[in-house]
Image: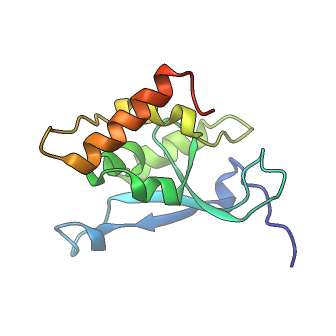
Amino acid sequence: MSAAPTITNRFRDFQLLDVSKTTRHPEHRGPYMMIQHGSAPEDPQLRECTFTLTKRGTWLHCYVFFLLPKPVRRQVAVFETVPELMELAENLPSKPIVESVESLSTLLKEGGFSPTKEDAENMALWSTVNQREAKGGMQ
Protein backbone atom coordinates (compact mmCIF):
# COMPACT_ATOMS: atom_id res chain seq x y z
CA MET A 1 0.00 0.00 0.00
CA SER A 2 1.45 3.37 -0.96
CA ALA A 3 1.22 6.56 1.04
CA ALA A 4 -1.48 9.05 0.12
CA PRO A 5 -0.36 12.17 -1.72
CA THR A 6 -0.31 15.32 0.38
CA ILE A 7 -3.15 17.74 -0.36
CA THR A 8 -2.30 20.94 -2.20
CA ASN A 9 -3.83 24.30 -3.00
CA ARG A 10 -3.53 23.62 -6.74
CA PHE A 11 -6.90 23.81 -8.41
CA ARG A 12 -6.16 20.81 -10.65
CA ASP A 13 -6.08 18.63 -7.50
CA PHE A 14 -9.59 19.67 -6.39
CA GLN A 15 -12.93 18.07 -7.17
CA LEU A 16 -16.00 20.27 -7.57
CA LEU A 17 -19.16 18.77 -6.11
CA ASP A 18 -22.64 19.95 -7.01
CA VAL A 19 -24.58 19.26 -3.82
CA SER A 20 -27.97 20.27 -5.23
CA LYS A 21 -29.32 16.76 -4.61
CA THR A 22 -29.05 17.41 -0.87
CA THR A 23 -31.07 20.62 -1.00
CA ARG A 24 -34.74 21.42 -1.29
CA HIS A 25 -34.32 22.20 -4.98
CA PRO A 26 -32.55 19.21 -6.56
CA GLU A 27 -33.66 20.26 -10.05
CA HIS A 28 -31.30 23.27 -9.91
CA ARG A 29 -27.51 23.41 -10.02
CA GLY A 30 -25.58 24.30 -6.90
CA PRO A 31 -24.70 24.90 -4.21
CA TYR A 32 -21.16 23.58 -4.49
CA MET A 33 -18.33 22.18 -2.42
CA MET A 34 -14.69 21.66 -3.25
CA ILE A 35 -13.08 18.48 -1.96
CA GLN A 36 -9.70 16.82 -2.19
CA HIS A 37 -8.38 13.39 -1.26
CA GLY A 38 -4.95 12.93 0.28
CA SER A 39 -3.09 13.37 3.53
CA ALA A 40 -2.70 16.51 5.61
CA PRO A 41 0.64 18.28 5.07
CA GLU A 42 1.61 17.87 8.73
CA ASP A 43 0.54 14.21 9.07
CA PRO A 44 3.69 12.10 9.60
CA GLN A 45 1.70 8.90 8.92
CA LEU A 46 0.33 10.23 5.60
CA ARG A 47 -3.16 8.91 6.32
CA GLU A 48 -5.53 9.37 3.42
CA CYS A 49 -8.60 11.45 4.15
CA THR A 50 -11.09 13.54 2.26
CA PHE A 51 -10.99 17.27 2.93
CA THR A 52 -13.39 20.06 2.07
CA LEU A 53 -12.35 23.63 1.31
CA THR A 54 -13.74 26.17 3.78
CA LYS A 55 -14.72 29.75 3.04
CA ARG A 56 -11.68 30.74 5.10
CA GLY A 57 -9.46 29.14 2.46
CA THR A 58 -8.48 26.29 4.74
CA TRP A 59 -9.16 22.57 4.51
CA LEU A 60 -11.38 20.65 6.91
CA HIS A 61 -11.46 16.88 7.37
CA CYS A 62 -14.78 15.72 5.95
CA TYR A 63 -15.53 13.68 9.06
CA VAL A 64 -15.32 16.90 11.10
CA PHE A 65 -17.46 18.69 8.50
CA PHE A 66 -20.22 16.09 8.91
CA LEU A 67 -20.07 16.41 12.70
CA LEU A 68 -20.92 20.09 12.43
CA PRO A 69 -24.54 21.19 12.71
CA LYS A 70 -26.14 21.24 9.25
CA PRO A 71 -26.69 25.02 9.10
CA VAL A 72 -23.06 25.62 10.07
CA ARG A 73 -21.81 23.22 7.39
CA ARG A 74 -23.43 25.44 4.80
CA GLN A 75 -21.95 28.59 6.32
CA VAL A 76 -18.48 27.07 6.59
CA ALA A 77 -17.89 25.17 3.34
CA VAL A 78 -20.81 25.35 0.91
CA PHE A 79 -20.58 27.90 -1.90
CA GLU A 80 -23.65 29.23 -3.68
CA THR A 81 -21.95 29.81 -7.03
CA VAL A 82 -18.96 28.48 -8.95
CA PRO A 83 -17.48 31.99 -9.43
CA GLU A 84 -17.50 32.52 -5.64
CA LEU A 85 -15.64 29.27 -5.18
CA MET A 86 -13.22 29.94 -8.05
CA GLU A 87 -12.31 33.36 -6.69
CA LEU A 88 -11.36 31.82 -3.36
CA ALA A 89 -9.44 28.97 -5.02
CA GLU A 90 -7.44 31.41 -7.16
CA ASN A 91 -6.28 33.32 -4.08
CA LEU A 92 -5.19 30.42 -1.87
CA PRO A 93 -1.67 30.55 -0.45
CA SER A 94 0.84 28.05 -1.82
CA LYS A 95 0.79 25.86 1.30
CA PRO A 96 -2.55 24.33 2.35
CA ILE A 97 -3.72 24.79 5.93
CA VAL A 98 -5.82 22.07 7.58
CA GLU A 99 -8.19 23.14 10.36
CA SER A 100 -7.36 21.64 13.75
CA VAL A 101 -9.50 20.92 16.77
CA GLU A 102 -8.09 24.11 18.26
CA SER A 103 -9.39 26.20 15.34
CA LEU A 104 -12.85 24.62 15.43
CA SER A 105 -14.29 27.27 17.78
CA THR A 106 -13.29 30.05 15.38
CA LEU A 107 -14.71 28.12 12.46
CA LEU A 108 -18.00 27.61 14.32
CA LYS A 109 -18.23 31.25 15.37
CA GLU A 110 -17.48 32.47 11.86
CA GLY A 111 -20.14 30.07 10.61
CA GLY A 112 -22.73 31.71 12.83
CA PHE A 113 -23.19 28.72 15.14
CA SER A 114 -25.36 29.57 18.11
CA PRO A 115 -27.34 26.64 19.53
CA THR A 116 -30.60 27.07 21.40
CA LYS A 117 -30.99 25.74 24.92
CA GLU A 118 -33.47 23.17 23.58
CA ASP A 119 -30.82 21.75 21.25
CA ALA A 120 -28.99 19.48 23.71
CA GLU A 121 -26.62 17.86 21.20
CA ASN A 122 -25.37 21.13 19.75
CA MET A 123 -25.24 22.76 23.20
CA ALA A 124 -22.90 19.92 24.25
CA LEU A 125 -20.71 20.55 21.19
CA TRP A 126 -20.64 24.28 21.88
CA SER A 127 -19.80 23.73 25.54
CA THR A 128 -16.95 21.34 24.70
CA VAL A 129 -15.49 23.71 22.12
CA ASN A 130 -15.65 26.64 24.55
CA GLN A 131 -14.04 24.60 27.35
CA ARG A 132 -11.16 23.60 25.08
CA GLU A 133 -10.76 27.19 23.97
CA ALA A 134 -10.65 28.38 27.60
CA LYS A 135 -7.94 25.80 28.38
CA GLY A 136 -5.88 26.93 25.41
CA GLY A 137 -6.70 24.08 23.05
CA MET A 138 -6.39 20.32 23.24
CA GLN A 139 -4.30 18.76 25.98
Number of marks drawn: 0
Q: Quadrant of residue 45?
A: bottom right
- Determine whether 135 is above or below 102 in the image: above
Extreme residue in the left direction: 118
Residue placed most toward the observer, 123 or 32: 123
Residue at 63%, 32% (x, y): give it. 139
Residue at 68%, 59% (x, y): give it. 12
Residue at 31%, 45% (x, y): give it. 72
- Could you say where residue 64 lies in the image, as x and y percent from the top left? 49, 53
Residue at 70%, 51% (x, y): give it. 10
Q: Quadrant of residue 37?
A: bottom right
- Could you say where residue 98 lies in the image, as x and y percent from the top left? 63, 43
Extreme residue in the right direction: 2
Q: Quadrant of residue 29?
A: bottom left
| Left/right of residue 93 with respect to residue 120 in the rendered view | right
- Could you say where residue 116 lies in the image, as x and y percent from the top left? 15, 38
- The scheme the figure's colours follow is rainbow
The quadrant of the image that shows the N terminus is bottom right
- Could you say where residue 97 lies in the image, as x and y percent from the top left? 66, 39
- Determine whether 22 is above or below 74 in the image: below
